[in-house]
Amino acid sequence: MIAFMDSQLLLFILVNIIYMIRNLGKYMFMLYHIFFKPEKFSVYWRRFLDEVIQLGVKSLFIVSLMSAFMGAVLVIQTATAIESAWIPDYTVGFTIKQSMLLEFCPTIISLILAGKVGSNIASELGTMRVTEQIDALDVMGVNSVGYLVGPKILAALFIFPIVIMYSMFFGFFGGGLVCYFTEIIPVNQYILGIRSFSEDNFVFIRYAITKTIVFAFIITSISSYYGYYLKGGALEVGKASTNAVVYSSIFILFANYILTQLILI
């Protein structure tokens, strides 16, 4: 009985390894056709602008809302946690700056974008696959991967760092509003904390932008993969969207650890 269970477990692991290798091969094949068999620049340009609006501009409202409340909550929690006559008030502003630049804006906002943008990409491409629009492009001789997926990846690489910078501003702004209306700490001390040790700001911003660019590629490429290679009917579109969000989030967290090790340590 034990030997039978061991063989079943070994078979299960082997099947999953083969499935992972197969998916990795299809993923690399998709990237190859995007970057090594591209369409003309004029074809990309219009779709690039459309995707910038779809992926970035239309995400600004939720990003600004989340960032402002995140900054506000961080100010309250930090000010409450370090109430001491020995700790200056500007420490709150400095802590908020470190938290927003290093982790909250690039990582948490990217996870939010993985849910919003990733599900949108997977459902859009999945619907096109189900309705045979992608097959029609292939029949017409169009490089469907390059035409549909390429502009999404390029647009995300361009607009996501701008969105994250926008998120940083609203995070600091939300914290400043809390300081102004609640007087939990003086506003001038909050601003002093943000401006203190400014020689490290460039390193932190470079770190945040580098992470964002990697996360943008992960979100768009993985979501496009699950949408583009969808098999089945309309029911599978929802499953593809779920898989896109889940696996994008997992790889974002994994990449976050690797990049932190490489850049900050």
Image (cartoon, rainbow, N blue to C red):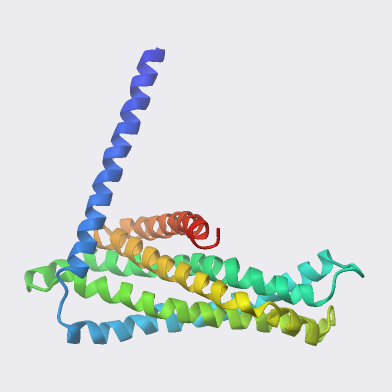
Whether residue 192 sits left or right of residue 144 in the image: it is: right
Residue 5 is situated, as x and y percent measured from the top left of the image, at 39, 19
Residue at point 53%, 70% (across, down): 106
In the picture as drawn, the residue positioned furthest to the front comes out as 199
Between 242 and 73, the one lying in front of the other is: 73
Relative to 263, does residue 209 appear above or below in the rendering? below
In the picture as drawn, the residue positioned furthest to the right comes out as 85
* Quadrant of the drawing holding the C terminus: bottom right
Whether residue 50 sits left or right of residue 112 in the image: it is: left
Relative to 40, does residue 34 appear above or below in the rendering? above
Q: Quadrant of residue 173?
A: bottom right
Say if residue 212 shows up in the picture. Answer: yes
Between 121 and 210, the one lying in front of the other is: 210
Residue at point 45%, 66% (across, down): 114
Residue at point 24%, 46% (across, down): 22
Say if residue 132 shows up in the picture. Answer: no
Whether residue 146 sits left or right of residue 103 in the image: it is: left
In the picture as drawn, the residue positioned furthest to the top comes out as 1
Residue 217 is situated, as x and y percent measured from the top left of the image, at 37, 67
